Amino acid sequence: MSLVIRDLSVRRGDLAVIDRLDLEIAPGEFVALTGPSGCGKSTLLNAIAGLVPLAGGAIEAERGSLGCVFQRPMLLPWRTVLDNAAFGLECRGASVDDARSRARTFLEKVGLGRFTGYFPNELSEGMKQRLTVARAFLVEPRLVLMDEPFSSLDETARRELQDLVLDLWAKSKCTVLFVSHYLEELVYLADRVIVLGPRPTTVVKTVPVQLRRPRGIGNEGMLGLMESVQRCR
């Protein structure tokens, strides 16, 4: 699914957070956003999701086929891993039995098949976020918004989930918009890195990532692109 943003402005009271932003993402593209803290990255994702009002401009996207992954796992503590995974399908009208069946199969694929009867407080932070990612992709979205989803994880868990997201993205052919501060993560995941400026945010620079997948961590090409992104921030 394509995502087209034209002349977008968002305000919070008297504060201009986003000012006349233009952005276009092609169907199936993996695009990463970065920029200084407080510049409006999360606000932009919330605007795309329809969670904040626009002060001007327009966003063209199919809101009914949207998946979201936030910085903190948004899990229901009274539901098991299986029922948390099935929740999105239930919200889209699937029967409980059908949602659980599809969720069980999907959880096996993402390494959580042995934990379907666990509750969120029994999971590690990495497993919680793995479950959140699974729930987002399980509904077969055409657009996935990811807001610093791995920032609280250790390096090992972060790397595992980066690879999981790349695998799910490649299989689903959905469009992904991914926010991160980690230079290596940006270049490892994305087709393009878009650098946003200080609030009120606009696009400062777009850095294409023309490296073959799978990408080697820390290779010369990645290091050069990381330096290019860093110089823009």
Image (cartoon, rainbow, N blue to C red):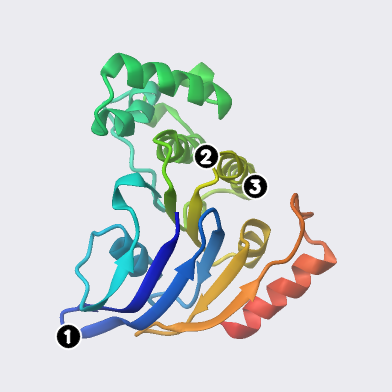
- Which numbered disc, 2 or 3, marks the residue that appears first in the sequence? 2
Q: Does residue 59 appear left or right of residue 114 in this picture?
A: left
The residue under the point 69% across, 72% down is 226
Q: Is residue 51 visible?
A: yes
- The quadrant of the image that shows the N terminus is bottom left
Q: Name the residue under label 2.
A: 126
* Mark 1 neighbour density, 10 Å: few (under 14) some (14–19) many (20 or more): few
Q: Does residue 111 appear left or right of residue 203 in this picture?
A: right
Q: Is residue 117 visible?
A: no
Residue 45 pos. (x, y %): 36, 63
| Mark 3, secondary structure of its residue | helix
* Mark 2 neighbour density, 10 Å: few (under 14) some (14–19) many (20 or more): some
Q: Name the residue under label 1.
A: 14
Number of dots carrying numbers:
3
Rendered image quadrant of residue 211: bottom right
Rendered image quadrant of residue 102: top left
Residue 159 - label: 3
Q: Does residue 37 appear left or right of residue 94 in this picture?
A: right
Amino acid under label 1?
Answer: Asp
Q: Does residue 223 appear left or right of residue 26 in this picture?
A: right
Residue 207 pos. (x, y %): 63, 75
- Real-space CA distance between mark 2 and mark 1, rounded to the nearest whole angstrom: 38 Å
The residue under the point 33% across, 37% down is 75
- Real-space CA distance between mark 2 and mark 3, rounded to the nearest whole angstrom: 10 Å
- Which numbered disc, 2 or 1, marks the residue that appears first in the sequence? 1
